[in-house]
């Protein structure tokens, strides 16, 4: 009996090799190669015929923002760039239980589309989906439910009903019988996603694929799905927090800087109209180690609370832990505080947290992190009506940040009276009532923040 052919692939980047490798030559990760059967097409099988799109001149193509499909969910429209596009292929990923299926089912109920909508599930039965729909108060006559894993059967049903919106939950559970490997393998994912892409582009169907994530939080696939789709949306947040953040990692029809903020309630996901107020609602006042910073997420300014706890270490190696911000950045800021201000932090445990389950990566929060650490170390509370922002360099200087006017406007709207900004960042001809205090370096900024 002939031995079946196998090959090895990197589970991180999808690189294929004829033999096992300890280190991937493409992405550089170690011990990521897995063995898989080589794909073999079965005999006497015919794939469903999909229409080809003829070539067109650029001037003959008619596309405008009016061609978008309004999802009926403002936060989702923001992340998508204004709504779904006919023929767009969207990948929605997130941790298990975060609310992906809830979001897609609510989308079905609110989308401004009178044509047929098909919800395809490879994980749940029709009864389970019906129960969730009743719990969410969804009653949509245009909705068709299909529970199927065979991609050829799914294709025939799509060809039969010709829907204008398809939701496939999830892409890792469907398979093509012509491919001998198991569902969820790289070969199956590549071929199934290619088939779905033919639906979307050939028939002009807006399609949303729900995808799983790996234990490291990356989109499972590995990266082959992200390259084939038009948009990658990541639904993130802690399961024990009520807030959820929808973030765009890739978008061919809009910006990748926008985020949508939701709140998990009894009857599904609710949009958060005023995120700054929601994130600051439980902020402790007159307490050391907490400060507010206006950050930018796309075109939206948000006020977030940064907390720090610095305490003497009883071990040889002090602990450093961060939640919601970059660990290496916090370590660098602590080194700047120690070198430029003389704070003895080398024997202190330090914990930094962005409140609310958000993750912020922009350098404008440097001053807030440094101020929270210094406040906790010196046991001095920061003034309750002040916000700070600025990037910190290795020499301790404060560097400019973008969109300062919009950040300060949001802070003023939330009742803050003072703002500490880099000296070279003073807005011109501003008409804000908030008092602006400039600082050239971290020493000047902290002298006001902690000592007035």
Image (cartoon, rainbow, N blue to C red):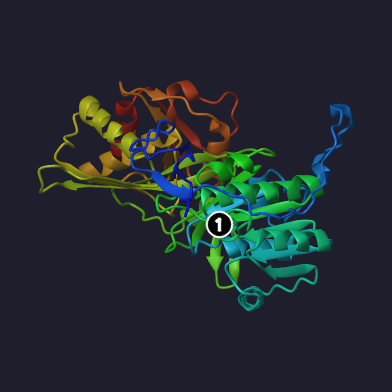
State the image coordinates of residue 80 (x, y, percent, origin top left): 67, 46
State the image coordinates of residue 360 (x, y, percent, origin top left): 45, 42
Q: Provide the residue designation for mark 1.
A: 172
Q: Is residue 72 visible?
A: no
Residue 391 appears left or right of 263: left
Residue 6 appears left or right of 64: left
* Label 1 crowd (10 A; few <14 / some 14-19 / many >=20): many
Q: Is residue 36 visible?
A: yes
Q: Is residue 104 above or below residue 259?
A: below
Q: Is residue 332 above or below residue 131?
A: above
State the image coordinates of residue 392 (x, y, percent, origin top left): 37, 28
Residue 152 appears left or right of 396: right
**Marker count (numbered):** 1
Measuring 54% from the left and 58% from the top, which residue is drawn there? Answer: 183
Residue at the limit of the structure toward the front, as seen here: 1
Q: Is residue 116 above or below residue 77?
A: below
Between 12 and 183, the residue placed more toward the observer is 183
Between 168 and 142, the residue placed more toward the observer is 168
Residue at the limit of the structure toward the right, as seen here: 60
Measuring 80% from the left and 72% from the top, which residue is drawn there? Answer: 141
Measuring 70% from the left and 69% from the top, which residue is drawn there? Answer: 146
Quarter residue 67 falls in: top right
Numbered disc 1: secondary structure: helix
State the image coordinates of residue 343 (x, y, percent, origin top left): 19, 33
Between 137 and 52, the residue placed more toward the observer is 52
Q: Looking at the rendering, in which quadrant would you find the C terminus?
A: top left
């Amino acid at each position: 009996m002939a031995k079946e052919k196998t090959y090895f692939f990197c589970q991180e980047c999808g690189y294929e090799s004829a033999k096992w490798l300890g280190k991937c030559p493409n992405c550089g990760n170690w011990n990521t190669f897995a063995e898989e059967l080589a794909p073999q097409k079965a005999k006497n099988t015919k794939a469903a015929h999909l229409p080809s799109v003829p070539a067109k001149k650029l001037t003959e193509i008619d596309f405008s923002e009016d061609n978008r499909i309004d999802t009926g969910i403002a936060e989702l429209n923001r992340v998508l760039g204004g709504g779904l596009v006919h023929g767009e292929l969207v990948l929605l990923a997130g941790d298990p239980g975060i609310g992906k299926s809830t979001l897609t089912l609510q989308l079905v109920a609110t989308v401004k589309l009178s044509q047929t909508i098909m919800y395809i599930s490879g994980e749940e039965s029709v009864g389970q989906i019906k129960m969730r729909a009743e719990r969410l108060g969804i009653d949509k006559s245009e909705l068709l439910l299909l529970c199927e894993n065979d991609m050829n059967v799914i294709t025939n049903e799509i060809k039969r009903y010709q829907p204008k919106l398809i939701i496939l939950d999830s892409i890792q559970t469907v398979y093509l019988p012509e491919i001998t490997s198991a569902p969820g393998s790289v070969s199956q994912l590549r071929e199934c996603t290619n088939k779905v892409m033919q639906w979307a582009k050939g028939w002009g169907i807006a399609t949303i694929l729900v995808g799983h994530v790996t234990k490291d939080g990356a989109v499972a696939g590995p990266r082959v799905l992200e390259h084939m789709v038009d948009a990658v949306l990541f639904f993130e947040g802690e399961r024990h927090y009520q807030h959820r953040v929808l973030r765009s990692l890739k978008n061919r029809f809009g910006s990748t800087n926008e985020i949508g903020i939701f709140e998990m309630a009894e009857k599904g996901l609710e949009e958060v109209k005023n995120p700054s107020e929601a994130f600051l609602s439980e902020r402790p006042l007159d307490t050391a180690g907490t400060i507010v910073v206006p950050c930018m997420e796309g075109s939206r300014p948000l006020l977030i609370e940064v907390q720090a706890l610095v305490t003497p270490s009883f071990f040889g190696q002090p602990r450093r832990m961060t939640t919601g911000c970059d660990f290496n950045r916090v370590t660098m800021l602590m080194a700047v505080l120690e070198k430029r201000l003389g704070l003895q932090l080398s024997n202190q445990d330090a914990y930094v947290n962005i409140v609310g389950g958000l993750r912020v990566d922009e350098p404008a929060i440097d001053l807030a992190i440094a101020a929270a650490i210094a406040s906790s170390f010196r046991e001095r509370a920061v003034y309750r009506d002040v916000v700070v922002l600025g990037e910190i360099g290795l020499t301790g200087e404060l560097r400019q940040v973008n969109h300062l006017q919009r950040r300060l406007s949001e802070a003023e709207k939330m009742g803050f009276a003072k703002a500490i900004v880099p000296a070279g960042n003073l807005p011109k001809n501003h008409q804000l009532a908030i008092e602006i205090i400039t600082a050239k370096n971290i020493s000047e900024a902290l002298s006001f923040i902690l000592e007035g």
